[in-house]
Image (tube, rainbow, N blue to C red):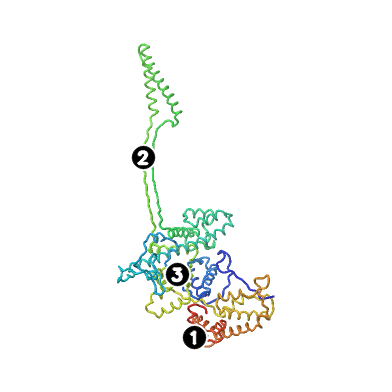
Amino acid sequence: MPIVIKRFPEPLCSPPFASPEARLAGSQARDTLRSLMLRYCQRRIAGRSVLIAGHRGAGKTTLVKSVIEELFHDQRLQIDARPLFVYLHGPDLVSGLDVLGLDKEEKKDAPPSTTNVIVIGKPDGTFVLPGTPKPEEHAARPPNPAEAGKATPLRSEAQEESFQCRLATLALRQLTVSLHQAFVTHIGWRMQETAHKNRRYEEVAQFRLDLDRQIEVRDLRSFWDRTGVLESGILRSPDAAGTDYKSSQGTLEIIALASLSDAYTRAIAKDVEETEGQQLEEKRERKQEVEKSRDRKELVNSIGSLLSGGAAAAGVASTTVGQIPARIFLAALAFSAASVLTSALLNFTSQRSFSLRGSKERKIIYNDTLGSLELMVPLLIHRVQDAGLAPVFVVDELDKIDDPESKMDLLLKQLKHIVADKAFCCFLVDREYFETVRTWDQATSRSRGLTYFGERLYVIMRHQDWHAYLQYVLEVSEDNRLLEYAAIALRYVLLARSKMHAIDLRREIESLPRRAGSDDEVALGASDILTRPFNQNLLLYQVAVEFLLEEGALGARVASDTNFLQLAYDALYYPLRMWERGETKFSWTSDALAAYLVHCLRVWAV
């Protein structure tokens, strides 16, 4: 049997209730990040800003995802809060671009500026306010004779403050939108899981669609009640739900979801008007009548009138003294008078009416200024934590922006109290920015930036970590001693070819030849791996590299300073890189090596 490549899914690719299967190489950065995130989920720290660096393809994003997935299934966090992955696109967050499209009308209506170029950042890496021309366009414009001799005014203090506030406001909006999307996606997955128990597939599907827009609290409570999770909830285990919050778990989830739904509407809408009406009407009536039915009433009145008239006439006839005609006339008169009077009395109605009306209307236009959002975002984070999830904001792709130092400084000096003290944020940057941040420790002018990042982690794996990972990935399916030796040699060959770089190692593994009809069985026998001169040279080179990393002054240095390990890798693989490029004669001078190392620092590859 051949060597078999074991494949694992990437972290956070499946719904959260699936057990984790991802397998990654360990590192000191991963251990530190896991410890910090665990304390945050247990609410032992309020927040932390973590700078995670590494050159492109080092596996920064995968590392953060794997830690989140591992802690999500940690039994210790069933009572506290499990981590929730919240993705943020770094270039949109820090570059001042309104990705929500809220300023398109302002840009369309505002006339282009012809005199003021508001420049932010360094001269060699600038960006301008929306609606203003770029510096090169301003310089290329033909000179105006009327403006000859006039200096171009720079941005004023008010303009700078306005831009910084707008940048921070847009960033907080994106934080709100991303947190809402992550939370409702997780809620939808959990509700879909409960659908298998109560057979409410269509209702749950409609609920997931309703989460894409603002949803009222009464609708949320009604749905939680109908699905039978109003008390137990869906984000914590039934035994731990609501034990530390003096409230039912379902109520905590409804509060968090309603707050996020309202904040999401504020973040994506230009303005929101809310009208609240209240009308009070009271009407009192009192009527005295024999019957309300018209027909019955008329009949009774007629009979009553006749009886009354007859009784009156009979009484008059029996008591009147005199001639018979006079008695008849008086009786008829009494009969008529009694009938009319009785009918009038029976139709008498007493009615009294009292009416009171009141109306109250309230119009709310939400305030989306920086101060309002600064108060709202921490509240949302706390309510999501109460519900059982701890948001972890991952700001990725920061190595794709120009002049990250100036742009990150503009953002963090406005939002440092949130991203570092009230939330857990991971900023994924490149190696060059990481080295720049390290120089702040010696620069008194950058003392403000020393507290931007509570932790600075550099993602790099030691050779021991890579060997442990490859030993698990490259599996020998039978008890064959020679094939086991070949698998060990293959690990050294792969590490040498990839220079112990994560993405290059993955590519080398994928490029191994496969047996016909199989995607996992390597089509290399023991003799192919052990006897080829090319593989023997790479194996010997990798053994020499690992020996130097463990012995002498270099071994002591990398053991005490993990950040120095990347520089050591670049230097140790310098001859191999030159040889692979076909340069058999290259300079060994310190200047040539220094130029090569600077080149590696800036472009991360030769």
In the picture of the structure, the residue carrying the numbered disc 2 is 354
Q: Quadrant of residue 106?
A: bottom left
- Nearer the observer, 382 or 60: 60
- Nearer the observer, 581 or 92: 581
Outermost residue, top direction?
A: 323
Q: Residues within 10 Å of mark 2 (few under 14, many from 20)?
A: few
- Whether residue 595 is visible to the viewer of this picture, yes or no, is yes
Mark 3 belongs to which amino acid? Gly
In the picture of the structure, the residue carrying the numbered disc 1 is 592
In the picture of the structure, the residue carrying the numbered disc 3 is 47
Cα separation between marks 3 and 2: 61 Å
Q: Taking 69 as reference, is 439 left or right?
A: left
The quadrant of the rendering that contains the N terminus is bottom right
- Nearer the observer, 466 or 132: 132
* Spot occupied by residue 38 in the image (x, y as percentages of width and height): 50, 71
Which label lies toward us, 3 or 2?
3
Q: Secondary structure at mark 1?
A: helix
Sequence-wise, which precedes: disc 1 or disc 2?
2
Q: Secondary structure at mark 2?
A: strand
Q: Are marks 3 and 2 in contact (CB under 8 Å)?
A: no
Mark 2 belongs to which amino acid? Phe
* Spot occupied by residue 397 in the image (x, y as percentages of width and height): 48, 70
Cα separation between marks 3 and 1: 44 Å
Mark 1 belongs to which amino acid? Ala
